[in-house]
Amino acid sequence: MSEQADSLYRRERLFIGGEWRPSTALDSIGVISPFTEQPVGRAPGTAPADVDAAVAAAQGALTESPWASWDAESRADALDRLADALELRAPATAGLVTAENGMPISVSSTVEGPGPARTLRYYAQLARTVAQEERRPAASGSGTTVVRREPVGVIAVVVPWNFPQSLTMFKVAAALAAGCAVVVKPAPETVLDAFQLADAAQEAGLPDGVVNVITGGGDIGAYLVGHPGVDKVAFTGSTEVGRAIGEVCGRLLRPVTLELGGKSAAIVLDDADLASAVRGLAWACLLNSGQTCYTSSRVLAPRGRYDEVVDAVADLARSLRIGDPSDPATRVGPLVSARQRDRVESYIAAGRADGARVVTGGGRPADFERGWFVEPTVFADVDNSAAVAREEIFGPVLVVIPYDDLDQAVAMANDSPYGLAGTVWTSDEDKGLEIARRMRTGTVGVNFYNLDLGAPFGGVKASGLGRELGPEGLAAYVEYKSVYLRR
Ligand code: NAD
């Protein structure tokens, strides 16, 4: 392993105020490979004093550094330079994410490696087109109002382990485009890849303190979220933690964006071409071994084609190659942790106890002595009220539920505590759009599911508050100021 690769897997310092500073924490954070169950690397822990320093550095960037006076064009150029620096690192980043969380390399090398640069370039372009100030004739008829878009300020960015690079950049790119400064706290499971951003920020010449990267678990996350120097919190993670963060931010009257869990429905219509639908379902339902917030993990099938859909989905699940996540042929890797595997297995047991039928999977694959694997599992004869149909499992487990007519299908899709995503599978796209309009959810894909950087992403109900991506994602980091002029 080269010297540089060594340093990617072993970090000694935190990135605060544009420099590498020793942590004041006594602990460090070890990352364990979900495939080999052996250590991958280590990063320093973070103590509250380090959070104080990171928040102070971000505040300094907004008041004392050139960042505060740069216009949108200069910020956009900086975002493009950051994108260049991240692009150079993309293959290493993809490999690192795969080593940390077991994401199949075919996914990390198309999403986690190159994705952050794409998001930055999108927001750089948007920053160039959105006016920082506009003049409006006052509605009263006399005078003029100058409406300014000002940065919200210091943003606490708290992210999970499942798509650590993409989810961090959804927040950081929009925040920087708006002129904010960020303190990023990754999940302990994927703490190492977060420092790729720090390396790139240094290389891109971002002013000191604009990007700060710290570490830590839930306690440090909570300390950061409630810190008096933070102006807004941008969180992706579980609904449970999101609720706790929402409560804190409510008390503090602090703006917050929450991207939380999901239990989305795939509605297969009577006219669907199953052969092509099934190819799309592999991505929409089982991406990253099912550890994806927007997966359509409830498949709703018309009763007349129920057996056919169950068989097709089960064939799909059986066909996905399970294995070493760093092998490009692997489609299903291990789950991120032994704890996550326990959780998924407890849901499989609950499904069985509720009388659902395991069509395929249901256990651990036989060929592996190590690694936190669970076989892709398909349940049939599931009631929409069962725990496996209502709760987020976050693993390769699908349930197939029959429906009698479209009204019932839409009602079942909407009968969920969550509302993040969903898909409709049909040979008539107009009909698909019609169904999508009736689904109470933040996003819907017709015959595929692909996030669009240019459109808002987020959820309703227990799936979250606010939106990321698109111009709406930029607006989330802007405070409006109206200046009234007499003339
Ligand atoms: P998690 O909620 O346990 O942790 C997420 C992050 O929050 C981690 O960095 C963690 O250290 C930190 N944290 C934990 N407790 C905290 C607290 N009290 N205050 C502040 N920070 C705290 O989630 P996870 O297990 O890492 O990720 C899986 C979850 O993320 C799933 O529920 C999944 O659906 C959700 N997710 C949602 C989206 C989305 O866009 N809606 C995307 C990906 C993942």
Image: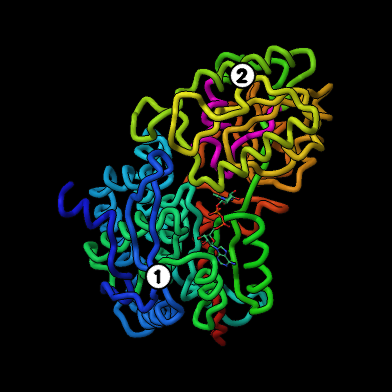
Q: Residues within 10 Å of mark 2 (few under 14, many from 20)?
A: many
Looking at the image, which residue sits at the far left? 2
**Ligand 1 quadrant assignment:** bottom right
Q: Are marks 2 and 1 in contact (CB under 8 Å)?
A: no
Q: In the figure, is residue 278 to the left or right of 358?
A: left
Location of residue 442 in the rendering, given as x and y in whole percent from the top left corner: 65, 46
Q: Residue at x 66, y 44 (%)?
A: 392
Looking at the image, which residue sits at the far front? 369
Identify the magenta region. 279-299
| The CB of the residue at mark 2 lies under 8 Å from ligand 1 | no
The residue tagged 1 is 27
Cα separation between marks 2 and 1:
45 Å
Q: Nearer the viewer, residue 123 or 295?
A: 295
Location of residue 422 in the rendering, given as x and y in whole percent from the top left corner: 65, 37
Tell which circle, 2 or 1, labels the residue nearer the N-terminal end.
1
Residue 208 seen: no
Total count of labels: 2
Q: In the figure, is residue 11 to the left or right of 142?
A: left
Q: Nearer the viewer, residue 86 or 360?
A: 360
Amino acid under label 2?
Answer: Ala
Q: Is residue 193 magenta?
A: no
- SS at mark 1 in the image: loop
Q: Residues within 10 Å of mark 1 (few under 14, many from 20)?
A: few
Q: In the figure, is residue 409 to the left or right of 394?
A: right
The residue tagged 2 is 314
Q: Residue at x 64, y 34 (%)?
A: 297
Q: Quadrant of residue 357?
A: top right
Location of residue 249 in the rendering, given as x and y in whole percent from the top left corner: 63, 73
Q: Residue at x 73, y 43 (%)?
A: 440
Q: Is residue 291 magenta?
A: yes
- SS at mark 2 in the image: helix
Q: Nearer the viewer, mark 2 or mark 1?
A: 1
